[in-house]
Image (cartoon, coloured by chain):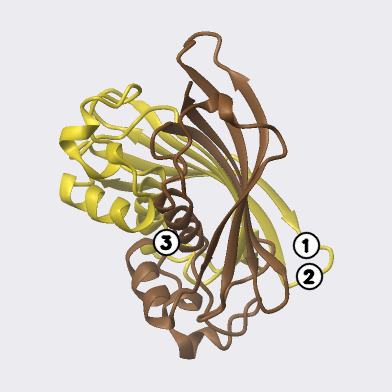
Chain colours: A yellow, B brown
Amino acid sequence: MKPLQSFDELAVGQRFTFGSFTLTEAEIIAYAEKFDPQPFHTDPIAARSAPLFGGLVASGLHTMGACFSLILGSGLFREISLGGSEINTKWPAPLRPDEAVAVESIVESLKPSRSRPELGVAVLRHLGTRSRDQQLVIEMAATHFLKR
Amino acid sequence: MKPLQSFDELAVGQRFTFGSFTLTEAEIIAYAEKFDPQPFHTDPIAARSAPLFGGLVASGLHTMGACFSLILGSGLFREISLGGSEINTKWPAPLRPDEAVAVESIVESLKPSRSRPELGVAVLRHLGTRSRDQQLVIEMAATHFLKR
């Protein structure tokens, strides 16, 4: 994607789409063994008896990372992303292996920084939607510091 | 740690400590190349001119994962963790390579589920504190579903 050059190019309500990702069973297990070791993320057999999931599901942290991989890998924010301070994340439904997830971001609020005139504070709502049934699987409200 | 056997063993205000972790420069770069590709996470030279950080810092997602690795790897929640639905995360200060971070969790609220009497909903505040100066580097309010 064509990189934005300034925070001031953004407008509230603007929407960006970033394509989709899938996580394989092997990727889900490898991630969770390192960062979220729980049987419903790491053991397909044990996961069958997990009361809420009934099968292997991706770690929510892995889903976050897969979204950010697409969003930041797109290059859209390459020239202006200075960091972030806060993300509120919800996982309304579980994500299973090999399910495609479409990623988009919506500009929720924009506020020039008072203390640092060279940057603005943007809240972006990043959404991951399961393609087979249009079910939201992740929703993040993320505070980004962006160059003006 | 001795695994909890039920949600009902928890009490509001209870605190658990999980030891500490450090992330090496190589680990920070490898994680970010995959899940958070931004120069201040992946390129030590380019990171020097990052306006907010002035050097390489860990991806916030990586810090989350390193905390959960310790918390879940401890075994404390092994018998009762059924999943989660929401995490509100703040990163009040950046984390640089080889800085030790001590991890603890505080029980913030406990609510038996009305719709599913076999589980309870716990909000746990997970904190990561940089050992050298006692600066909080990550704070997560996480909603966990726990077996009763």
Q: Looking at this rendering, what residue extends furthest in the right direction?
A: A114
Number of marks present in the image shown? 3
Marks 2 and 1 sit apart, C-alpha to C-alpha, by 6 Å
Kindly identify the amino acid type of the residue bearing the numbered disc 3: Leu
Q: Look at 24% across and 25% down and name the residue there.
A: A49
Q: Check contact, mark 1 vs mark 3: CB within 8 A.
A: no
Q: Position of residue A42 (x, y in %)?
A: 25, 45
On screen, residue A120 above or below B49: above
Residue B59: percent from left, percent from top: 49, 66
Q: Is residue B69 left or right of residue A101?
A: right
What chain is tagged by disc 3? A
Task: Write the residue at 78% across / 70% down.
Answer: A117
Chain of the residue on which disc 1 is drawn: A
Residue A72's tag is: 3
| Disc 1 to disc 3, C-alpha distance | 22 Å
Q: Where is residue B64 in the image (x, y as percent from the top left)?
A: 50, 56
The answer to whether one can see residue A95 in this image is yes
Q: Name the residue under label 2.
A: A117
Identify which amino acid the numbered label 1 is placed on. Answer: Ser
- Mark 2–mark 3 Cα distance, whole angstroms, equals 24 Å
Residues marked 2 and 1 touching at CB (< 8 Å): yes
On screen, residue A97 above or below A82: above
Mark 2 Cα-neighbour bin, 10 Å: few <14, some 14–19, many ≥20: few
On screen, residue B72 versus residue B55, left or right, reads: left
| Residue B82 image point, x, y percent | 40, 30
List the residue tagged with mark 1.
A113
Q: Compared with residue A70, is residue B132 higher up or lower down, i.e. above or below?
A: below
User: Can residue A1 be seen at all in this image of the molecule?
Assistant: no
